[in-house]
Amino acid sequence: MSSMSLHGKVALVTGGAQGIGRAVVEHLLENGAKVALVDLNQSVGEECKSDLDGQFGEDNCIFIQCDVTNAGKLKEAFQNTVKKFGRLDIVINNAGINNEKNWEKTIEVNLTSVIQGTYLALEHMSKEHGKEGGVIINVSSMAAFLHSPHQPVYTATKHGVIGFSRAIADASEQGNYGVRINTLCPAFVDTQLLRTVEHEETMGKFVKYKDEFKQRMDKYGILKRNAANHNR
């Protein structure tokens, strides 16, 4: 998106208080958008909001504490965004975790919440519902293309995000929803999520493959950017 196309737009970003999500939020604000910053972590979200207020002004960003796996709370986050800013133009379903030990939670966060967030976005943006259209970006991962033994469920969820996004994009085109749906597939980015691969409490029995994972990081490299390093 160009800065001109972002000026005056309203965006909602899940997982927006740190890592890739925060970098996205900052880019949106820098280019004139208003943003609903949605995140599970109350303290990190409030600190992020305070930092952003200092840079971009208090009226351009709101923080909404929300567990994206709670369908009712996620729906409220969308409603509160529209109530505050009067419209919704961009939704970025970015919230994600990497937990092979509690793999059910990984599916809920990485895939189910993306599906739920996409349907909510369509309700608030689709021409089918009398709205003006918009853009949805669902965050997948390079893991969708490069499977590895250390994170089978994470890989499955990221495959699912791509498959779902392609199918719903076709539905949007054929139904004339006026909503463009894309998928972002980052490689290795220096965030807190990346470091979970070293811990048994998140990777379970698959932690034994962490050395192979590190070899992949050495091969492909790790993206480091100040905005992506806002991890608490």
Image (spheres, helix red, strand yellow):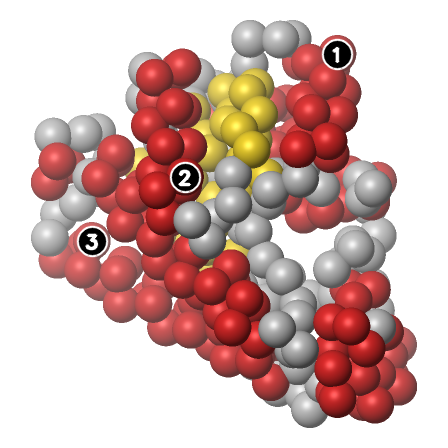
Dot in front, 2 or 1: 2
Whether the residues at callouts 2 and 1 have beta carbons within 8 Å, the answer is no
Q: Residues within 10 Å of mark 3 (few under 14, many from 20)?
A: some
Disc 1 residue type?
Answer: Gly
The numbered mark at residue 70 is none
Disc 2 residue type?
Answer: Lys
Q: Is residue 230 above or below residue 155?
A: above
Indicate the secondary structure of the residue bearing disc 3.
Answer: helix
Indicate the secondary structure of the residue bearing disc 1.
Answer: helix
Could you give the CA–CA distance between mark 2 and mark 1, rounded to whole angstroms?
Answer: 28 Å
- Residue drawn at (26%, 61%), measured in percent from left and top? 168
Could you give the CA–CA distance between mark 3 and mark 1, rounded to whole angstroms?
Answer: 38 Å
Give the camera-side residue of 23 and 103.
103
Disc 3 residue type?
Answer: Ser
Q: Is residue 192 visible?
A: yes
- Residue drawn at (83%, 42%), measured in percent from left and top? 232
Indicate the secondary structure of the residue bearing disc 2.
Answer: helix
Whether the residues at callouts 3 and 2 have beta carbons within 8 Å, the answer is no
Q: Earlier in the sequence, mark 2 or mark 1?
A: 1
Q: Residues within 10 Å of mark 2 (few under 14, many from 20)?
A: some
Give the camera-side residue of 214 and 221.
214
* 204 on left or right of 221: left
- Residue drawn at (35%, 58%), measured in percent from left and top? 115
Dot in front, 3 or 1: 1
Residue corresponding to mark 2: 73
The numbered mark at residue 172 is 3
Residue corresponding to mark 1: 54
Could you give the CA–CA distance between mark 3 and mark 2, rounded to whole angstroms?
Answer: 25 Å
* 12 on left or right of 119: right
* 104 on left or right of 168: right
Dot in front, 3 or 2: 2
